Amino acid sequence: MPVVSVVVPSVLRPLVQDAGSVRVELPGQGTVTVGQVLGSLAGSHPLLGRRLRDETGALRRHVNVYLGPDEVRRLQGLDTPVPDGAELLIIQSVAGG
Amino acid sequence: MPSTDSRTTLPPLVEPAAELTREELERYSRHVIIPEIGSEGQRRLKNARVLVIGAGGLGAPALLYLAAAGVGTLGVVDDDVVELSNLQRQVIHTVDRVGLPKAESAALAVADLNPLVTVVQHRIRLDNSNAVELFSQYDLILDGTDNFETRYLVNDAAAIAGKPYVWGSIFRFDGQVSVFWEKHGPTYRDLYPEAPPAGSVPSCGEGGVFGMLCAAVGSLMVSEAIKLVTGVGRSLLGRVALFDALGGSWREINVLKDPEAQPITELSDYAAFCGVLPQEETTAEPEAADDTVTAGQLATMLAARDAGLRDFVLVDVRETGERDIVAIPGSVLIPQGRILAGEAWDELPREREIVFHCKGGTRSANVLAAARREGYTKVSHLEGGVMAWVRDVEPEKPVY
């Protein structure tokens, strides 16, 4: 079962019981995609899911998801393969100064 | 002096001044003896004109370090005054300067630290009418503002003026820093093409900020500024440094220029872009008097409710931490972000009268408008929020 950890920024942590990261286990074998990880995350944390993706399932434009240092939109979007054990980093725009 | 890493090395932004005085050599000696800075780098700093937007959480440490480093001219844009609640993190201000304009307080602090620096106070609110012209007078801009509208304005005005800018942003324990320069790399719009929906992300005033985070992020912003002025090192242009103060860790992510993005050629309506209601729609106008209650009226309503003579729900739309400082007895908490995201309508009975309140009346006005759009009819909000309540009803309670 592939396992991916999703790192959540503090602005979204209230939606995941204040956890800094969420471990997502996916059924089956082999490679999973960013979309599958976020889908599973939305299943366990529906409010977070709605903040990350719109009604059509597309990533919201003010939310960025990174695999390593790269934003997944610049890779293969939600189809980007995520290796077992990898970390997905969610970044949300904040404006505090 | 050339850097060994050419990937993001940029030419020095500023030509060197003719010479350093004896006093300057002594004052800046710890920089001058670093080979990468040297006398030439220090003379570039002496000639540099750097504009800092916001003398707040990020601007405060940034201005102190820029002044200490010997940047010749510092512009300070801020139209606010120093408040007691600033002093937890805005280390450039002091108790005896509470009530003074922040730009003036910053100028006094810089003069104390380094009288060789010229400070230009811009006690204005940055807007479409002044941003490009102001930026044109400086070599480099530091963006430490506190709202999305101004951040997109800074980005676009810097692009139009052809200037690089160092961007830093903070919330609670998280900080983000980058350099944007349309001429040579990505801009803020490549990182975040859109602002989050208005009200979905609390500001530092609503959600709080870890004071020391300001120093970490503000000083990194100055590091980038000094590197740009002197042309040393590898710029954060094209990368964002992320600091998690709670985890004690830094990360780095890449930002690429969006190949399909249109060049920025004009300023736009940033309030509309960020989904912020125009002021006249968020404040109570006389014709909307039914929509608002005063603190005194609310006190009467609550007394009637306690006596069983009236039924309504008082909903506090602030954040949990704000409520820990001061709350109106008999209110229930549902933060505005949950309501505006549509997550809380089930908790708000349509058949009962509802009064919303926040700290000062802006958030509750937004929630009121959203409730009306959702079909609620018996809704109103507290004019002036809990601050008006404390002023008029329970003056012994704390403000923030």
Image: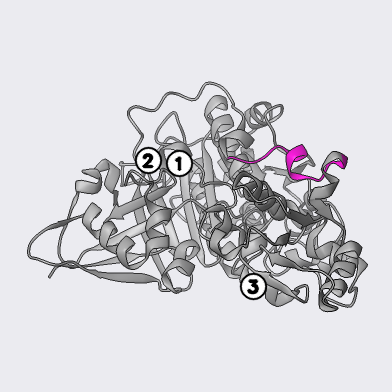
Question: Which residue range is magenta in the image?
Answer: B275-286
Question: Can you tell which mark lies on residue B9?
Answer: 2
Quarter assignment of residue B3: top left
| Location of residue B169 in the rendering, given as x and y in whole percent from the top left corner | 54, 53
Judging by the rendered image, the residue that carries numbered circle 1 is: B231
Tag 3 subunit: B
For the image, the number of numbered tags is: 3
Mark 2 crowd level (few <14, some 14–19, many ≥20, 10 Å Cα): some
Q: At x 89% / y 62%, what residue is drawn?
A: B297
Q: Earlier in the sequence, mark 3 or mark 2?
A: 2
Amino acid type, label 3: Gly
Tag 1 subunit: B
| Location of residue B24 in the rendering, given as x and y in whole percent from the top left corner | 66, 51
Judging by the rendered image, the residue that carries numbered circle 3 is: B321
Q: At x 44% / y 46%, what residue is drawn?
A: A62
Quarter assignment of residue B293: bottom right
Marks 3, 2 in one chain: yes
